Image (cartoon, coloured by chain):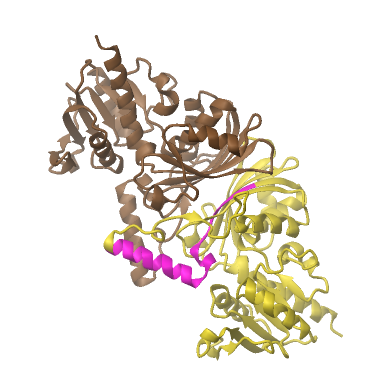
Chain colours: A yellow, B brown
Amino acid sequence: MNIRKQYHVAIIGATGAVGKELLHQLEKRHFPIVSLSCLASKRSMGQTVPFKNSLIPLQMLTENSFNGIDIAFFAAGKEVSKHYIPLALEQKTFVIDSSSAFRKEKEIPLVIPEINSDAIKEHQLICSPNCVASILLMVLAPLHKKQPIIRIVASTYQAFSGGGNQEVEKLKNATQAFLNEKTPSYYAFNLFLHPTPKGEDDYLDEERKVIEETKKILDDPTIEMSVTCVRVPTLRVHSISLNVEFNGPMSKQEALTILSQSKGIAFMENPTPFAVSEQDPVFYGRVREDKSRPNCLDFFVMGDQLLKGAALNAVQIAETITMRQLCHSP
Amino acid sequence: MNIRKQYHVAIIGATGAVGKELLHQLEKRHFPIVSLSCLASKRSMGQTVPFKNSLIPLQMLTENSFNGIDIAFFAAGKEVSKHYIPLALEQKTFVIDSSSAFRKEKEIPLVIPEINSDAIKEHQLICSPNCVASILLMVLAPLHKKQPIIRIVASTYQAFSGGGNQEVEKLKNATQAFLNEKTPSYYAFNLFLHPTPKGEDDYLDEERKVIEETKKILDDPTIEMSVTCVRVPTLRVHSISLNVEFNGPMSKQEALTILSQSKGIAFMENPTPFAVSEQDPVFYGRVREDKSRPNCLDFFVMGDQLLKGAALNAVQIAETITMRQLCHSP
């Protein structure tokens, strides 16, 4: 990528739930863009997406799409990332991937800028983490720095937009049908396990991602975790009930002090998706000393998973890179 | 209470969410009733409730309502229980209370018949436990008998009918308004802390009840618990994500074997409120060995909180009493 103050940017998957938020974040945060290519599959051709008072026509994603692109945000799922990211890297494009395609690769950094921006180094491909991992780590990483965390028990309350726009439509349509006709259905006023494949040990892919990515981002393979991922009928914002065991003393007051000095998070006494929706920070509340075991605290954390859990984090990674380049530029 | 084969029964709070289910359970389970009095406050006068193909007019609850009543089911809240139960007991009425009014009293039994029917002894007042405590204990009590549980971390997903019919109406109305006008509101597609008062330690009344009642029913004050209670936009059925630590080895296979031999519960691989609603058993799924700590298992349990969490349990207590009286009758 050339060092300059304005960038040729591409978004892959611009019509998706995360893609729309990427456009919104780039605009809101005044990301220095000289050109914006919104790339999508054949079936989206003819559509436009709004950006800065204009409508940008979608372009077909092809193997040549990355010629001249400085920064590409991938938000079109694992398979698209697997196929097209190597092609983008060949073109010297700087890639930020919101999918899980490369997150596990040891040599590819997985970054939350407030926590481990150092991991970016000279890498050209950076992964943005799973939404649940991002949200819980925004609250736990600053504490872990002061007093190592040895075990986390997490139960999630995940919003339907985590499954994309089509899942939100299914939820709304089924709910409307139920309210009209009183016919119960799977999507109306129901909850269920996060719909990712299940392994032989009965662990869901989503749960495994949270565990592996937490260890990778904190660069600490010794942290033990038990995770249960559940989708609940909310539209956006993931909530997580956390029981956290530290290696030594960590009082409620000490935790609150550390958290109040940390970036990107805010205290809310009774956080709700209604209050947290479309807000940038991750919110934490219900910080309680768990009397059932020494050195344990409970937390209820919440974040808009389309923002800090995806689009906002990706744009912050891009900002970290561009800031660094400007500082190093001749 | 006289020993006989048919009973004069009263339901206090027959128009409420639990009251309606009490009527339904008494009918469905062929409880031996000679007369049924449905008692309610002044504002319900003129209303009727359906029972066995007829409509029973509500009668006003007064201090003389218990004259000649053999068994009274209280389901009208704590304050009504506090005032009227002593009057019912004076009339030698056998009382089953679904409210929390007397559950903490050491000398008053708190009973789930499958677990501690022995506690009934010769008592004339029996309390039926909190809905979350009932549901989790149906699964954990049989395991605790074989290998003592030393710690439970629980996060709940509680349905709106836990707050009564009026909360369900609020949820439906707010959801309809949101779907019509796209105006976000507190009750539409939102979740929040269980709306009971909070103590200085940030613990909710609901959470405290779960802890205290679990200890009382298992008759084991040493069990340690951390509980987080959350209301989610489902209509009925409470779900609970459980992380359970035993005093010694308890494999997944051993737990499954014990549970398959226990009464009133059933395995469901992916339990959902949609599938569990209006069903008598408590369902358990996602039994996983928690590799993060020795002797720990995870469970996801679910039960219709208006049934085993309230009305069904109350009727089962009455059945236990009447069966016992029949066995002892001359």
Placement of A310 over or under A299, stated as above or below: below
State yes or no: residue B11 in magenta.
Answer: no
Q: Position of residue A158 (x, y in %)?
A: 53, 59
Q: Residue A199 vs residue B4: left or right?
A: right
**Residue A179 in view of the camera:** yes
Which of the image's four quarters has the N terminus of chain B?
A: top left
Q: Residue A147 vs residue A195: left or right?
A: right
Q: Residue at x 83, y 74 (%)?
A: A122
Which of the image's four quarters has the C terminus of chain B?
A: top left
**Residue B103 in view of the camera:** no
Placement of B176 over or under A245, stated as above or below: below
Q: Position of residue B187 (x, y in %)?
A: 39, 58
* Residue situated furthest top in the rendering: B330
The part of the image, by quadrant, that contains residue B52 is top left
Q: Magenta span covers which residues?
A: A153-180
Q: Residue A222 vs residue A263: left or right?
A: right
Q: Position of residue B319 (x, y in %)?
A: 30, 26
Front-most of B38 and B315? B315
Q: Position of residue A60 (x, y in %)?
A: 59, 88
Tell me the chief SS of the magenta region: helix
Front-most of A96 and A41? A41
Front-most of A39 and B91? A39
The part of the image, by quadrant, that contains residue A217 is bottom right
Front-most of A83 and B115? A83
